[in-house]
Amino acid sequence: MATDEFDIQLDGPARLALVDSVLDALDAAWADAPDVPDEDRTLFTLAVSEVATNMVQHSDGPTQVTVRIGIRLASDALTATLVDTAPPASIDWHGVAMPDENSESGRGLALARSVLDEFTHTYDENGNTWWLCRRLAQSAD
């Protein structure tokens, strides 16, 4: 990787425009990380997009939900922390699976889980925190 680490920090209301901003920032960041393999870029971006979009889609409620996203591109891993102010998301991780091929939704968490090495969700009275990690293979120099 051209730099040891590259950080992206974004926050705003839980709207699709924020997801677009995150994806634009990731696209721009890949230029500073030419050694990250294309497959890792694509799959990490997919996971971030799916989780962020889920957060936006499930943020309906009487109060405005805000989202804070931090992404780190490092030589050994790509990580993201997504935090919102929404009520706790109840996730049945045993039930997270790909829906049938005709379903129009329900793939987000299953896709993210399948392309990440680590994927966790925690919550407290302040909201939800999602942590995503895709480790990079170390090249032999």
Image (spheres, grey):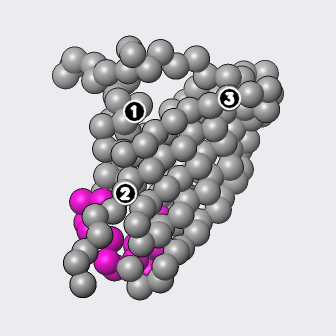
Q: Magenta segment, which residues?
A: 26-40
Report, in whole angstroms, how far the alpha carbon at label 3 lies from the one at label 1: 19 Å
3 or 2: mark nearer the eye: 2
Report, in whole angstroms, how far the alpha carbon at label 3 lies from the one at label 2: 24 Å
Left or right? Give the position of 102 relative to 116.
Answer: left
Q: Which mark is residue 108?
A: 1
Quadrant for residue 127, please give it: top right
> Do the residues bearing badges 2 and 1 touch, measured as CB atoms within 8 Å?
no
Q: Does 56 appear in magenta? A: no
> Do the residues bearing badges 3 and 1 touch, measured as CB atoms within 8 Å?
no
Q: Nearer the viewer, residue 56 or 34?
A: 34
Q: Residue at x 39, y 32 (%)?
A: 108
Query: Circle 2 sits on which residue?
Result: 135
The quarter of the rendered structure image containing the C terminus is bottom left
2 or 1: mark nearer the eye: 2
Q: Earlier in the sequence, mark 3 or mark 1?
A: 1
Find residue 126 and report its horizontal and vertical position in percent: 79, 32
In the image, what residue type sits under mark 2? Arg
In the image, what residue type sits under mark 1? Gly
Q: Residue at x 66, y 33 (%)?
A: 128
Q: Which mark is residue 123?
A: 3
Find residue 117 and report its horizontal and vertical position in percent: 36, 45
In the image, what residue type sits under mark 3? Tyr
Q: Which mark is residue 87?
A: none
**Secondary element at tag 1:** helix
